[in-house]
Image: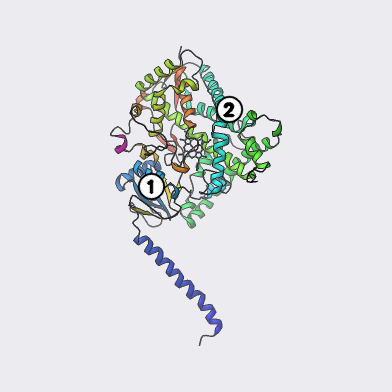
Amino acid sequence: MINHLEIFTIFPSWLLTTSSLFFISIIFLYTRTSKLPPNPPKLPIIGNLHQLLGKPRHQALCHLSKQYGPIMSLHIGSKPFLIISSPKMAKQVFKNQDHLFCSRPMSRATGLLSYNYLDIAFSPHNDHWRDMRKLLVSEFLGPKKASSFNHVLATQIKHMVHSLSLHSPKVSVNLNELLLETVKGLVCKVAFGKNYREQPIKGPSWEVMLDETMEMLNGSLGDSFPWLGRLIDRLSGWNDKLERCFGNLDAYIETIVDDHRNQRNAQLGDDEKDFVHTLVELSTIPDACSGYRLTKEEVKAVIMNVLTGGIDTTVVTIVWAMSEIIRNVRVMQKLQTEIRNLTGRKQMVDQVDITKMTYLKMVVKETLRLHPPAPLLLPHETLSHCQIGGYDVLPKTTVLINGWAIGRDRETWGENADEFYPERFENLEVEFGGGNCEMVPFGGGRRSCPAMNMAPTTVETAIANLLYGFDWEVPDGVKKEDLNMEEDGCIVVRRKLPLYLVPIKHM
Ligand code: HEM
């Protein structure tokens, strides 16, 4: 006889077993009846990880997609991925079903570095993301800041040209360093104004801090292998490195915010206020309509996005453009003729001149087609079950859109897809984020880069001025056509080796 007490102890385990079996069979049936995209054969525990080693990730994925198709599923450990590798499939994601593909996956690094998803880039799709993105566009990237942006851009470029003209003849310049100084100065002066500090007061240099942040954002073993991976993250020192990296970045951002808080905003004219003044103001005075006040964490999270999203991407684009231009003498001559003819005899090329330079715009487009700085964009995540290309995609799948493979798709770009040939845009109406997703260097849909219209201006202005006042040569012993074009990096992919070129002042 089972007494009352025994019934109470048996009942929960019986219930637990039955309900577990029920849920397991539902999941089993769901995955069995779903038509999932083709997937390369995977190994137990690690999944497809071994197929991604030895090459940059976007190249390895492009290679696999040639075998398994433009829509492919993968597993890294226990984490499911969907890989999109053609314009047609990208269009289905960005144009037809953007509302289902517009969230972001969570990870330990993005969580910590975004102040618990209070930013724009790593926040899941929600009202908070929408409000913060609107704020960034209206107060930093939109027409409100256009005049101060153009003014600072002109000053930075003038400074760059001046430092080049003082350079000893026949000595090569590290273009990565030169352009980092220029773009960092531009973004930080527009965002932080006079309070911009060249280097943090304490801790590592600004460059080291940013490199470490990008490395951490790339993720860790713990994101894909919950138990063992987290243990390895702890034992290998990855967790400590992440905490240290966040500590340094936070201390730098905190100083910027405090400097702004200590100023009396009321005494500043509208044209003297920078982006952080506006953010700090919104954190002290409640919004007139909603009554909402930004928290200090929200302010810092947006600044983190500007620092990590706005500088490296722009520098990398200009350096790739200069690398392609130097390797292609014909392109260099044609571009210099356009720039010099349309500028006339002036000290510098300005914004008005640039609007007339059609070949320059083609060169920038061709650079972003072949070398999108973020080749896999930022990972997207599905919000619910959806279908694409006749296949089922499960909720909470991480979606990698291979912008690098899309820009080199032979069906779209023809047999010379791998060649740097700006003239292909002469009779082709292709815009960034355009309807057919032929190239997606700024992503697409609602999560596309909010600087998509503004960033090319910086790139065009820098290239025009580098080529207007100077002719360029490769250092002795290097052949132009043999210039090393290997790639390196995780989220942002740059040249493996810095670009050294010799400037020759043009009379
Ligand atoms: C040539 C320069 C740039 C390139 C190639 C670029 C590229 C990208 C890409 C590929 C994405 C992800 C899109 C997606 O997931 O679909 C992105 C997102 C983003 N970018 Fe840029 N970017 C550039 C410049 C900038 C600048 C100057 C800023 C700001 C100062 C910026 C801020 C952001 C932000 C905040 C996001 C996240 C958007 C969201 O999740 O809603 N980017 N960018």
Q: Residue at x 56, y 34 (%)?
A: 140
User: Foreground residue, 289 or 474?
Assistant: 289
Q: Residue at x 30, y 32 (%)?
A: 416
Q: Which residue is mark 2?
A: 148
In the displayed structure, would residue 236 be above or below residue 316? below
User: Foreground residue, 30 or 96?
Assistant: 96
Magenta part of the protein: which range? 409-418
* Left or right of 506 in this view: 247: right
Mark 1: amino acid: Ile
Q: Residue at x 41, y 51 (%)?
A: 81
Q: Is residue 397 magenta?
A: no
Q: Is residue 221 visible?
A: yes
Specify the quadrant of the image occupied by residue 147: top right
Compute the Cα span from label 1 to label 2.
40 Å
Overall secondary structure of the magenta section? loop
Q: Position of residue 11 (x, y in %)?
A: 51, 77
Q: Which residue is mark 1?
A: 83
* Mark 1: secondary structure: strand
Q: Position of residue 132 (x, y in %)?
A: 56, 43
